[in-house]
Image (cartoon, rainbow, N blue to C red):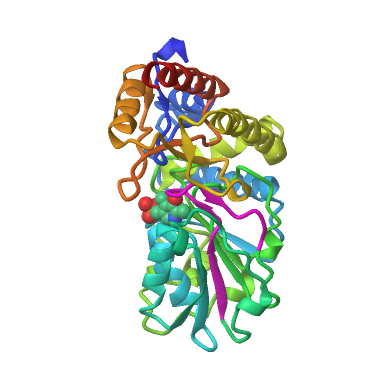
């Protein structure tokens, strides 16, 4: 880190990328593999770019053990466009879908879906400021729902599902934007998984969709062409110009994850990093966590001092010491440390040391 004088960026997104990925991209910037051009300048129809997207997909399939009956799509529009595309494509029989509300992103997805069908809130933790994950099973969902929707990791509130809801035969849709590739996932339990890249995968610009094949091809006739999963599945994510450079960086991140031993190893490191911070938070009364311990996120860790001015002072002093973006989301305040995959363990050590000192000085 010292070599480049970099900060530790605790932002919820866009966030840090592995230094080795940035170095590799920098090295390939002016002349990618002897082509005489950068990936930014390259035709998306070239053999070189085809090789880049093919390898990215195949490495992602390896990392997540994605079954053959699932398509991987590289789309644009962020997580937000998926809030619309999911109902437009998946409300295919009864027009009913059940949503579990566990935070702002789930709520936004729900509000958007309400434009398209008969959408029900199956459960919600809004009664307690989204501090926990409701426990739901088959009996909580309408048997004829076209899908059930969850937000697997709640970026703003700092919670994560400790379980995968059993929906029986109803396809389960999960927004994994802020925990994608931080753990192994049994993809076959889901009908559709999506993740915007800028939290844990790549720069902003690409959204990864993993969708079971039987859920493709049901969009209504008037669906705008870009919003139909089928066009992207049929054209290998190249119906139009894809976000080439972002896909390339995502591919480098997938390579990096494979090189360190895959998602089980990544998860072990994430558990260790988050564990250090939670252990300290649990050992002091000065800072208070805002989430139910059994539903804690490894990626987004939220806490408060109980005094807004002190929270602000904390964020400011940390920034001055090279630890950036610790302010909680504007809708909830407080402090939030996002410890995504690329946050080095040293960043967490530095944060905890700072927190101890800040506690002593401000108690
Ligand atoms: C950031 C985020 C989004 C929104 O992503 P955009 O790419 O900005 O549209 C959606 N869901 C979750 C869980 C997020 O963290």
Image-based side of 138 in relation to 147, left or right: right
Q: Is residue 184 left or right of residue 73?
A: right
Using the image, determine if residue 211 lies above or below residue 247. below
Location of residue 155 in the rendering, given as x and y in whole percent from the top left corner = 46, 48
330 vs 208: above or below? above
Image coordinates of residue 331 in percent, x first then y, are 32, 50
Residue lying furthest bottom in this view?
94
Instruction: Kindly indicate the quadrant of the structure image that contains residue 145.
Output: bottom right
Q: Position of residue 233 (x, y in %)?
A: 54, 66
Q: Is residue 299 visible?
A: yes
Q: Which residue sits at x=53%, y=41%? A: 299
Q: Nearer the viewer, residue 83 or 125?
A: 125
Q: Magenta stretch?
A: 146-164
- The reply to whether the magenta stretch includes residue 118 is no
- The front one of 126 and 72 is 126
Q: Quadrant of residue 166?
A: bottom right
Residue furthest to the top in view is 3
Residue nearest the observer in this picture, 329 or 54: 329
Answer whether residue 160 is magenta in the image: yes
Percent of width and height locating residue 26: 43, 24
């Amino acid at each position: 880190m010292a070599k480049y004088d970099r900060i530790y960026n605790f932002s919820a997104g866009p966030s840090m990328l592995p230094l080795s990925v940035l170095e590799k991209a920098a090295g390939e910037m002016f002349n990618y593999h002897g082509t005489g051009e950068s990936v930014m300048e390259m035709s998306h129809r070239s053999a070189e770019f085809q090789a880049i997207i093919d390898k990215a997909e195949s490495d992602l399939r390896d990392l997540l053990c994605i079954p053959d009956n699932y398509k991987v799509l590289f789309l644009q529009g962020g997580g937000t466009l998926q809030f619309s595309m999911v109902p437009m494509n998946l409300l295919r029989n009864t027009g009913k879908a059940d949503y579990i509300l566990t935070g702002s992103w789930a709520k936004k997805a729900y509000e958007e879906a309400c434009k398209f069908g008969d959408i029900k809130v199956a459960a919600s933790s809004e009664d307690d400021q989204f501090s926990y994950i409701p426990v739901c099973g088959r009996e909580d969902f309408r048997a004829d729902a076209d899908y059930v929707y969850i937000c697997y990791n709640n970026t703003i509130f700092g919670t994560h599902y400790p379980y995968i809801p059993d929906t029986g035969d109803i396809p389960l849709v999960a927004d994994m934007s802020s925990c994608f590739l931080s753990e192994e996932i049994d993809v076959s339990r889901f009908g559709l998984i999506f993740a915007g890249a800028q939290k844990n995968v790549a720069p902003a610009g690409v959204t990864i969709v993993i969708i079971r094949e039987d859920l493709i091809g049901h969009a209504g006739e008037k669906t705008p062409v870009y919003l139909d999963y089928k066009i992207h599945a049929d054209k290998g994510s190249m119906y139009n110009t894809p976000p080439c450079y972002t896909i390339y960086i995502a591919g480098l991140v997938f390579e990096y994850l494979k090189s360190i031993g895959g998602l089980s190893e990544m998860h072990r490191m994430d558990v260790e990093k988050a564990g250090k911070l939670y252990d300290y938070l649990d050992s002091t009364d000065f800072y208070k966590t805002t989430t139910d311990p059994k539903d804690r996120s490894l990626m987004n860790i939220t806490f408060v001092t109980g005094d807004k001015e002190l929270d602000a002072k904390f964020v400011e002093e940390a920034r001055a010491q090279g630890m950036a973006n610790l302010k909680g989301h504007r809708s909830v305040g407080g402090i939030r440390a996002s410890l995504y995959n690329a946050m080095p363990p040293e960043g967490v050590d530095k944060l905890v040391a700072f927190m101890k000192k800040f506690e002593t000085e401000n108690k």
